Image (tube, grey):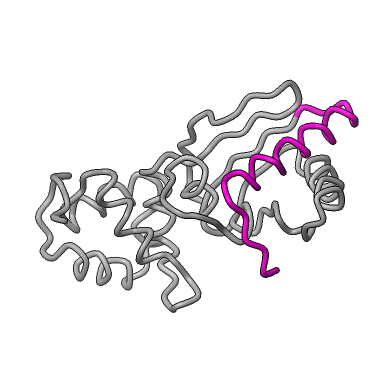
Amino acid sequence: MSDLRLTAAGIRRLLGLLEEELAAAGVLGEVHVVGGAVFCLALGARDATRDVDALFRPAAEVRRAAARAAARAGVPEDWLNDAVKGFLGRRGDFEPYLELPHLRVYTAHPRYLLAMKCAAMRLGPEFHDLDDVRYLLRHLDVRTAGGAMEIVRRYFPEEAIPAKTRYALEEILGGWGYGTEAVQP
């Protein structure tokens, strides 16, 4: 992973270059963005991210076009990557973000993003998962651990949710009441 810091404007510029490369290749691409890039682009909750985690198709063509866009922009080839595949739920929930002639971009719905962050629950200073979960709980107006787990279970089977997720949610929200009432500031 590079030390790249992509702002929302930088991501939009790269997506524009990606669209140009896809047009030159005669390909219509779809990019389903998850992770930190959603916090930058759709939520305005983060100034920058290190990369754009996404599912994209057609995968090989988008990957090649992204590499050409990276070369043009002078950024690492991994600015757009699909390494997040292991953290995706059984179904996605995405909202349209950008529609260009050769590129459609969708961002993960905040509920789906919360579920992914909870299922991954990477701990440590190099990760943003706990801060992201706190932000999303406030954004979604969820105040109980039970309510948060209801959302996570919409996307992930119970056996795929690590115990540390439940502990973290209980620590953040306290208690196991059910419902999706507002998180206390």
Residue at the outermost top position: 101
Horizontal side, residue 52 vs residue 88: left or right? right
Quadrant in which the N terminus is drawn: bottom right
Q: Residue at x 45, y 37 (%)?
A: 93
Q: Position of residue 143 (x, y in %)?
A: 16, 52
- The reply to whether the magenta stretch includes residue 6 is yes
Residue 181 lies within the magenta run: no
* Residue occupying image coordinates x 45% and y 78%: 125
- When the figure is inspected, residue 183 is found, relative to residue 4, above or below; the finding is above
Residue found 31% across the figure and 71% down from its top: 163
Residue extending furthest bottom? 124
Q: Residue at x 77, y 57 (%)?
A: 75
Seen in the picture, residue 144 relative to 28 is either above or below; the reply is below
Front-most of 28 and 41? 41
In which quadrant of the rendered view does residue 176 lie?
bottom left
Q: Main secondary structure of the magenta part?
A: helix
**What residue span does the magenta drawing correspond to?**
1-28
Image location (x, y in percent) of residue 156: 40, 52
Q: Is residue 77 left or right of residue 7?
A: right
Percent coordinates x, y for residue 103 in the rendering: 71, 29
Left or right of 159 on screen, residue 100: right
